[in-house]
Image (cartoon, rainbow, N blue to C red):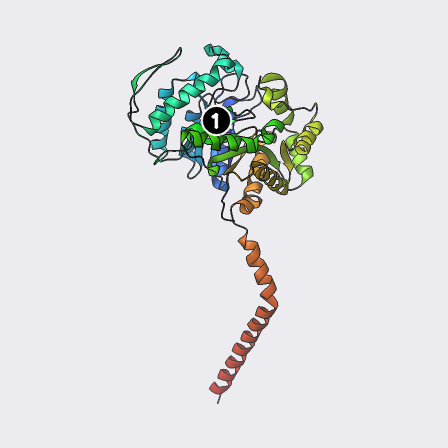
Amino acid sequence: MSHRMKFGVFLAPFHKPGINPTLALEQDLELVQWLDRCGYDEAWCGEHHSAGTEISASPEIFMAVASQRTRHIKLGSGVTSVSYHNPLWVAERIVQLDHLTRGRVMLGLGPGSLPSDGIMVGLSQTQTRPLLEEGLDIIMRLLTTEEPVTFKNDRWDLRGAQLHLRPYSNPLFDVAIPAVASPTGPKLAGKYGCGLLSIGATTAAGFDALALHWDVMEAQAAHYKTRVDRNKWRLVGMVHCAETMDQAYRDVEYGMAHWFDYFQAVAAFPQMAVPGSNVKEMISFVNDSGFGAIGTPDMVNKQIERLWKQSNGGFGAYLMLAHNWANFDATRKSYDLIARHVFPQWQGQMSTLAAAERARAARPELAAIHSQAVEAATQRYAAEAAARTH
């Protein structure tokens, strides 16, 4: 296949309240190092300020530290909550990181997903999306032009604002907008020619909307004379792999109940409603509904195939939501298995199987020729040895 799918992780992150947060954040960094070693393309880190579970307040700080511990993997803000920040500083910080990482950054921009975050800075959910639209326009103008930006609303007052550093990436690092089920994200992404982060790709509503979302992207791009690229469409899904189904089920007993409880009873984020009152029911929901895949690498391949078909044309990257359903050793094993057994099928690297089959088919004939060559060499040596004795 000519298409090379990218693989990565979407790291909120999720940690059970009450555990050592210093150790938890260190473990997140170690995970990104492991992904870099395994050949993953991307790691996106979130921004949250409340609710006790998603303990990353600054994607930029996490990205800066991770960049010093890795060599190849690209690092993205997944996502920066534009409504919480002055858009000039959002653009300034990512451009500085672009230079410090020599072009290994990506910028995800969203409204802010937790109502309990916004309320602390005087924002309701009815305000965050309009602020994203206004902030995104400012950020893209700052990043893509050198024209001064003047803008004023109830929260920001920009007066001839300009970046004092231009981006290191040429022409620009990837900028992506999240989408769950509504067309809001695709509308903005298409208008500015950005990538799309389909965070809700495997939810029932998000899955049904996949093809529609791309249609919205293309319609917006045509209207605003921008360009959208399926290679910059990233779908997020939940998986956990082990060498056997039974082992995968045992693995997720570690932390699955907490993750489900967070979305059932803590985070006011109804788009991620998940049923289940015990681990057995939760596993059944994940696997039976298509919400994710808990089992073997073959199940991950089937999940990606399902999403590929539903997208009606394909996408550029599959990001796994880092959920801490399993302990750290089992989590690293899962990512390793996916890299070994899933990547090749989506990155055009299955030619080794064909090479092995060609060699298998030719073995009898080639083995006979080899044996004949050895026999001929042996006979020549015997003849030469006999000649020397005379």
| Coordinates of residue 372 in the picture (x, y in percent) | 56, 75
Could you tell whether 193 is left or right of 245 in the image? Answer: left
Q: Of residues 349 and 83, which is closer to you in this image?
A: 83
Q: Of residues 323 and 118, which is closer to you in this image?
A: 118
Q: Residue at x 55, y 58 (%)?
A: 355
Could you tell whether 95 is left or right of 294 in the image? Answer: left
Q: Residue at x 46, y 36 (%)?
A: 232
Q: Residue at x 50, y 45 (%)?
A: 3
Q: Amino acid at mark 1?
A: Lys
| Coordinates of residue 357 in the picture (x, y in percent) | 59, 59
The image shows residue 158, relative to residue 351, as above or below, that is above
Does the rendering let one see residue 358? yes
The image shows residue 240, relative to residue 21, as above or below, that is below
Q: Secondary structure at mark 1?
A: helix
Does the rendering let one see residue 176? no
Question: For mark 1, what is the residue?
Answer: 187
Q: Residue at x 60, y 23 (%)?
A: 272
| Coordinates of residue 221 in the picture (x, y in percent) | 44, 31
| Coordinates of residue 70 in the picture (x, y in percent) | 43, 36
Choose top left, top right, bottom left or bottom right for residue 296.
top right
Task: Tell which residue pokes out farthest to the front in this image.
Answer: 223
The image shows residue 343, relative to residue 127, as above or below, that is below
